[in-house]
Image (cartoon, coloured by chain):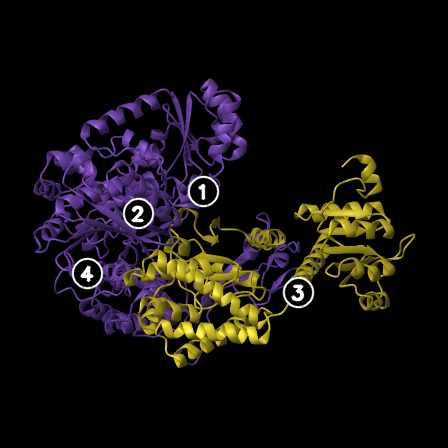
Chain colours: A yellow, B purple
Amino acid sequence: MNPEQKKEGILKDQKPYLADVIVIDDEESMCEGCKQTLEAVGYRAAFARNGEDGLKLIETAHPYVVLVDLKMPGIPGTEVISRIPKIDATVVPIIITGYGTIDSAVESMKIGAFDFITKPFGPDKLLESVRRGIKLSELRKEQQIGDEREKAPKLDKHEVLLRGLTVLSESYSVDLPRQNFLDELKYLETEAKYHAQMLGQVKKEEKAILDVVQELRIVDEIVDRHNFQKNMLIQILLEIQATLRWLPRYVLKWVAARLDIPLADIMTITNFYEAFSLEPQGRHTIQVCLGTACHVRGAPELLTKVSAVLGIKPGQTDTTQTFTLNTVHCLGCCALAPVLKIDETYYSDPSLDEMKEIFKSYATQEELSWQK
Amino acid sequence: MAKIMSPLELSTLRKELIQKSRSKAISITICSGTGCIACGSKDLALAFTKELEKYNLLGRVAVRETGCHGFCERGPVVVIAPSNICYLKVGEPDIAEIVAKTILENQIIERLVYEDPNTHQRLANLNDIPFYKHQKRVLLEQNVLVNPTSISDYIAVDGYSALVKALLYSKPDDIVKTIKDAHLRGRGGGGFPTGAKWETTRNAPGDVKYVIVNADEGDPGAYMDRSLMEGNPHGVLEGLIIGGYAIGAQEGYIYIRQEYPLALKNTEKAIQQARDYGFLGKNILGTDFSFDVIIHRGAGAFVSGESSALMNAIEGHVGEPRPKYIHTSVKGLWERPSCLNNVETWANVPHIVNKGVEWFRSMGTAHSKGTKIFSLVGKVNNTGLVEVPMGISLKKIIYDIGGGIPKAKKFKAVQTGGPSGGVLPEKLLNLPVDFDALTEAGSMMGSGGLIVMDEDTCIVDTARYYINFLAHESCGKCLPCREGLRQMLKILTNITEGNGNEGDIELLEELCELLTKTSLCALGQSAANPVTSALKYFRAEFEAHIQDKRCPAGVCKNLFCYEVDTKKCKACGACFKTCPADAIKWEKKQVAEIIQEKCIKCGACIAACPAKFNAIKKIHVKPVLQEC
């Protein structure tokens, strides 16, 4: 960026410039400050010094979140906010203003702002608000895609019936009695709904069912790779666990059917070994080592601290589904005792502050990769 | 790569490889064991390569990432050969200096060199550092020389020459006899004579036989097997192939815990390379002998390390043991004769075949020969992996190699043999490391965990810790183990919480005897050891918990609390800011106060309180008596 453009704050001549967050404020120090804070954690940020430029920038940069100052020369902030949905309905506006009163907060929410930050504010407040805004925007984008799919020419009811009949006829050819076939289908459908609910995700039923199909195909691939050998059961389950991060009921039932092993036998194995989880796991797994070397060097205290920082007990997943906390008997890292491991990285006896930083970095990383 | 079909081809290849490595006068080896990776050794190799490139030195200096060097406490460890300069705690910022000074001008960078904590003397040469000086590194030596993902490196250090010797110049019976004569004993814990085991399987009826590597290192506080599988998988593999030949097996299994991802990766790679070079597969080295190896990943269960349980697991069943009226060496995996040995045992085989029985027997005591790797961990200055000749005293390991106890604390006990072993007090420190001597003292050799405890470690808490571990890991098949351990845990928990009663100790002793005599497998039979030995040597500490409701070491949470010394507190608020439980009351210019009801006793406040104030202290308290 050359100094001239920097002064202008808007990159008119450049090719479509993508930004995750746009700041619209007449105060340059404000714009620069926000930009630096946002870029420090990996967001792409841009800014404009008035409403008009800001709206143009939104059109080209496709941001997730726009931070708008209420009081600006030219088009006022409220006007900017009300015009944003016409450009891109998935963009989430957040208000920044020096007039921190309840009234202006209520007013700005009414016109469609998502959040409200009062000047002066610290980086934490800004990032927190932006993060939530981006999540919302992502949801909206997903929704939009879903809506568009709905707009696509719908299958005719009769066409669906005919397809169903074809599948039914095929079920005879594989020697699957009609009632069994329907029962199995119904079971998988119920499981799909239950599954969506368990994960706490807002999923449409048809999407949940398609997810189940996709997961079972993955399972089939793994089973196939091991030539349907019964003695490879533990290896197969380990691979499924590694791919799906947990073992849903219908997957176990599927494996039982594919390998011709009673479900009870499979459940015995999944309950016996520590590697298997029968509940959904967070996106990152934290393992606190409770090996003897760690124990005598203070693993119980470390576990207490982790538990207190995350607000979850061993075996639990936090509400945002980011971390699952587990204990493990020995990671074989005794020289670094006490040690905790997040995914594949080991941390030796972090202090409370370091720990907070580490957890934060995982949460941020996640948002970064999730943006891509 | 064309398969090697004869000894001549192998020796030609070895000569070529050695020639090639000689062209590089200096080699930089970077430890890439899990410990050093955790300390940040991952990017060092790349940084060294880049820096060397600047000086155009890549033709003269080799950079090698190797397995664990053992000195994990001071990682990342970098060794520069041939001068054997050892740099500790090396970070990326040090690299430019190392290349400019040490590589180019042969100067030693004092700051990165080992400093003796007592004499403050700086020791640059690897072999001068006490940690290495008092060791006898046979198995671990190759860890420093070999990149575990490179079969060429292994061949260059005489790798697979023992296989040649065995396959082409010995009969299977001769190999069995060699192992028998060497008096090699199982390194997994029991110390069963390996040769006798091999012979049983060799003579057992049946054509199909199996050899198995037990790398399900479940002992908490031990990581010898991990480092061997990570650092030199070909060494173990070569031992296994020789064993397969001697015993008459066609197939081998390696059972690795899935908690050891790097070991898994390196072993998988080693097997593939061995196949490519023709050390595995059909007609190995042009002989009639065919042999292949399969990896089985363990899914996390301590009891699955027991021989019959492990074989059950490989068959795809739950890894529970079975009564062994017939030994697994006769009827094991799929009811066929199966010979199971620990990683370290297999790794010894190529050395014995190569260097001979006499060499092996020259190390050790009357009934325990060779060397043993220990993971020296806990409250000791130089934690890490050490390999010592059998017969060395515990004192020598802990004080000469381990550098004694940190922070000038007093030594209290050392636990050998993991959860199946026992604690040994100071008066037994002169005990030699020997299978039989340790068993006699109420502990056992085990797979090699040596956990050092200082005065701040509570023996009752440690005993509870082990029983908790074992109760959790008991498969529940037999009653004494399932129920006995649970009851012992209950009693020990009561004692540590200040709810112990008169008679608890006697009850514990009774349960210990019951477990030892009536359990189905070794897990239950040896489960009482930690408690029996603790009661034998540290009975007074149990009594202090029961009678005075006092934890002398200040570990048991119910028996102590943190308190702010109001005279010393300077009202800085550091503890208030760090407390994760909101248990500290503080306002500006006011002395902090700990709200005991909220305190989770994590100790974060002690760490946060500036050392110059030192205002938070641990005090003994008696718990409010609870009606049970």
Task: Categorize mark 4 by other alpha carbons within 10 Å: few (<14), some (14-19), many (20+).
Answer: some
Residue placed under numbered mark 1 in the picture: B37
Amino acid type, mark 1: Ile
Residue B254 in sight in this render: yes
Disc 1 versus disc 4: distance between alpha carbons?
39 Å
Quadrant of the snapshot with the N terminus of chain B:
top left
**Which residue in the protein does label 2 denote?**
B225
- Mark carried by residue B334: 4
Sequence-wise, the earlier of marks 1 and 2 is: 1
Few, some or many residues within 10 Å of mark 2 (<14, 14–19, 20+)? many
Q: Which numbered dot is residue A143?
A: 3
Neighbor class of circle 3 (other Cα within 10 Å; few <14, some 14-19, many 20+) is: few
Give the residue furthest to the top: B105
- Chain ID, mark 4: B
C-beta proximity under 8 Å, tags 1 and 4: no
Q: Residue at x 41, y 77 (%)?
A: A181
